[in-house]
Amino acid sequence: MKKNEVFSGRVILLPDDVDTDIIIPTQYMTLSAIKEMCRYAFSPLRPELAANICRGDILVAGKNFGCGSSREQAPEIIRELGIACVIAESFARIFYRNALTNGLLVIEAAGLAEHVKEGESLTVDMKENLLITTGGKRLGFAQIPSRLMEMIEAGGLVEYYKELNGVKP
């Protein structure tokens, strides 16, 4: 995602308190690759969800998304699934930081879950810091600091510092 980008995606609606054990259950943490773990994402909550996610979908959740253990694989899996961003009422701080470190766009927006339905389209306007629902409701969100957006745009912390230090792949 770019700091001045406008994009739309299909809403996947999740409840409050989605913890990292729901994002990726413990028994699948021994798999050797994030791609393998993706098949089991959200399986305790919605077993069919991972198979039905399309690139560009947007997760919309309630309060305290990403609570629980500090599982760095959780935001990596969400990103690998092709989720464009996660928008929640609030995030567990460790998940929020891990998401940014892994280049996953996360946005805090109070009340959004009340204005969207599963499957409808949601537009995210990064230039104007607006979320626009299918019904035309416009909700603002706080601007993400430019350094954090640069890190997200680079693909995460490691890639950001490679760019910053002129390291070529």
Image (cartoon, helix red, strand yellow):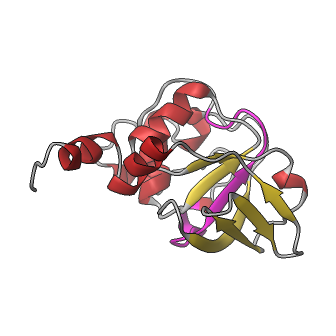
The C terminus lies in which quarter of the figure?
A: bottom left
In the rendered view, does 16 fall on the left or right side of 8?
A: right
Could you tell whether 125 is left or right of 113 in the image? left
Q: Residue at x 63, y 62 (%)?
A: 58
Residue 17 seen in render: yes
The percent coordinates of residue 51 (x first, y second) are: 54, 67
The picture places residue 52, in percent across and down from the top left corner, at 59, 70
Q: Could you say where residue 158 lies in the image, as x and y percent from the top left?
A: 26, 41
Question: Relative to 111, does residue 97 appear above or below in the rendering?
Answer: above
Picture residue at 77% right of the left edge, 36% below the top: 63
Residues 152 and 73: in front is 152
Q: Residue at horizontal 42%, vertical 34%? A: 72
The answer to whether residue 59 is magenta is yes
Residue 103 visible: no
Based on the picture, tell me whether residue 3 belongs to the magenta stretch: no
Q: Quadrant of residue 67?
A: top right
Tell me where residue 28 appears, x and y as whole percent.
Answer: 43, 40
> Range of the magenta residues?
50-66
- Identity of the residue drawn at 35% across and 53% down: 155
Give the number of callouts: 0
Residue 163 as seen in the image, left or right of residue 107: left
Residue 165 picture quarter: top left
Looking at the image, the residue that sits furthest to the left is 168
Q: Decide: is 66 above or below 54.
A: above
